[in-house]
Image (spheres, rainbow, N blue to C red):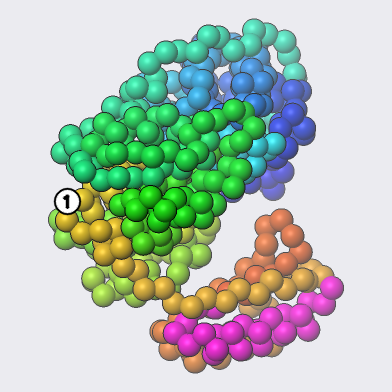
């Protein structure tokens, strides 16, 4: 059964338009109760969201459907996705819902559904939910209750208690970019409580400025601010604060690959990395793989998305995993990406070591080239003799010094050709040759 509404990370689109329109969300609320009640006469759903102007409206529409179907709602107001995940793990909720479009622009929004254990629901469950939604009716009922106070403080305390030293960031001047999103105010408070002198550049949400040229997906302004102010580093979150990107004291952007290598080495040295392996997606740079190998750590790759990362971590028993985009999960501490937890952990590691971020995060990236090829149809690459043979030849020529990745876009008629290797001229020529072979085999 193919999914129509759910993508890599929940439902996403233009706010107030299908599939984020009132009838659809009311029916989704009904479907959630029917599938997740598990015999509970009044299943309780925790709802939180980011700072977009549309968030409370979408939450209200969902609440109408849930309550009309016999469920109850706890409305948390502005809550980061990892906060909802934590509250589910320690509370007695049936499930959680986050109204957010993560790093998307302000006019977009989305719906993420989390299980009672704080994990994102599986693709299989999403398919069942879409099927149930087709049968559900958009009934009337009461909307959102008042905001439940005190929920955000429980999450704040959780982030703080993961650090043994109460003030590990003492003496550091840090610049914060909270993307004008769900981490605004909260992130400032946490960093200051940990001892840092904080300068904020994007922690004043007004409903229309979330992710506008700021945040983990656009950290350039943060990098400039770190250099201008002579700060020790910077932390960027995305709209729902489940991603972290750091800036070192030299203004260099440290993405998820940099953070994974630094954290993996620390856990490995402390004997807290089971089977000496971590998980990352197919998009992580080959330099991460070689950097880990030099430390005796294996890299298990998976498909894109932090849900895929977590599911692979569970399957192979890994304690650490993440994406280049900044979704990092450490199973010792959480079950989903957490920008504040990741950022404070890495900053504390650097401070404890007495080294600047530039020395702690020393990933040596390999050159990478990416070609997007327009195709007239999709066909498995291994079924195209010319492409299959050329791919095998390229892999042999790289001889463990690089890699090649072929995949189709999930939203456009494109084949993506990505090569990484030590010789940029070589991989560029090989990528171009492979792209031309795909064009010949799958003309527009």
Q: Is residue 428 left or right of residue 241?
A: right
- Identify which residue is drawn at 77% across, 34% down: 18
Q: Is residue 14 above or below residue 385?
A: above
- Identify which residue is drawn at 50% across, 38% down: 202
Would residue 31 be seen by someone viewing this image from the given angle?
Answer: no
Q: Reply yes or no: does residue 430 show up in magenta.
A: yes
Give 322 or 209, whichever is nearer the viewer: 209
Name the spot of residue 49 as percent of width and height, x first.
54, 28
Q: Is residue 232 above or below residue 413?
A: above
Q: Is residue 245 left or right of residue 210?
A: left
Q: Reply yes or no: does residue 16 show up in magenta.
A: no
Q: What stretch of residues is rendered in magenta? A: 419-444
Would residue 412 be seen by someone viewing this image from the given angle?
Answer: yes
Name the spot of residue 239 as percent of width and height, x first.
53, 39
Label 1 residue SS:
helix
Name the spot of residue 361 as percent of width and height, x first.
31, 62
Q: In this view, does 58 lie to the left or right of 290?
A: right
- Identify which residue is drawn at 68% across, 8% down: 141
Quarter of the image where one finds residue 259: bottom left
- Identify which residue is drawn at 55% across, 89% down: 425
Name the spot of residue 293 as percent of width and height, x first.
29, 73
- Identify residue for label 1: 352
Q: Is residue 197 above or below residue 402?
A: above
For the stretch drawn in magenta, what is the main secondary structure?
Answer: helix
Q: In this view, does 290 lie above or below 198?
A: below
Quarter of the image where one finds residue 392: bottom right
Q: Is residue 10 left or right of residue 224?
A: right
Quarter of the image where one finds residue 167: top left
């Amino acid at each position: 059964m193919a999914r129509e509404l759910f993508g890599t990370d929940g439902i996403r689109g233009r706010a107030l338009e299908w599939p984020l329109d009132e009838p659809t969300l009311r029916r989704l609320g009904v479907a959630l109760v029917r599938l997740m009640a598990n015999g509970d006469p009044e299943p309780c759903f925790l709802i939180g969201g980011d700072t977009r102007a549309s968030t409370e409206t979408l939450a209200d529409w969902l609440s109408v459907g849930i309550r009309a179907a016999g469920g109850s709602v706890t409305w948390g107001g502005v809550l980061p996705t990892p906060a909802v995940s934590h509250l589910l793990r320690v509370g007695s909720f049936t499930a959680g819902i986050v109204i957010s479009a993560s790093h998307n622009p302000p006019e977009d929004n989305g719906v993420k559904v989390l299980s009672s254990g704080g994990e994102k629901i599986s693709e299989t469950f999403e398919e069942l939910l879409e099927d149930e939604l087709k049968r559900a009716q958009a009934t009337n009922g009461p909307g959102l209750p008042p905001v439940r106070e005190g929920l955000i403080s429980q999450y704040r305390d959780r982030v703080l208690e993961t650090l043994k030293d109460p003030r590990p960031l003492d003496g550091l001047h840090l610049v914060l970019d909270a993307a004008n999103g769900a981490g605004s105010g909260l992130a400032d408070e946490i960093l200051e409580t940990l001892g840092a002198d904080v300068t904020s550049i994007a922690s004043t949400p007004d409903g229309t400025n979330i992710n506008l040229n700021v945040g983990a997906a656009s950290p350039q302004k943060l990098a400039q601010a770190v250099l201008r102010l002579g700060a020790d580093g910077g932390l960027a979150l995305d709209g729902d604060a489940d991603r972290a990107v750091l800036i070192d004291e030299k203004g260099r952007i440290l993405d998820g690959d940099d953070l994974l290598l630094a954290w993996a080495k620390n856990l490995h040295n402390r004997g807290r990395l089971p089977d000496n392996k971590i998980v990352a997606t197919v998009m992580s740079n080959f330099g991460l793989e070689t950097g880990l190998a030099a430390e005796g750590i294996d890299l298990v790759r998976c498909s894109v998305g932090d849900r895929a990362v977590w599911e692979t971590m569970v399957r192979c028993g890994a304690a650490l995993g993440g994406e280049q985009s900044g979704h990092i999960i450490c199973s010792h501490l959480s079950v989903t990406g957490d920008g504040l937890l990741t950022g404070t952990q890495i900053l504390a590691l650097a401070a404890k070591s007495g080294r600047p971020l530039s020395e702690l995060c020393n990933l040596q990236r390999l050159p990478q080239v990416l070609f997007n090829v327009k195709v007239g149809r999709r066909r498995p690459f291994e079924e195209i003799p010319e492409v299959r043979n050329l791919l095998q030849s390229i892999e042999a020529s790289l001889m463990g010094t690089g890699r090649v990745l072929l995949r189709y876009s999930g939203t456009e008629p494109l084949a993506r050709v990505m090569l990484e290797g030590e010789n940029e001229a070589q991989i560029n020529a090989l990528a171009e040759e492979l792209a031309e072979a795909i064009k010949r085999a799958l003309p527009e």
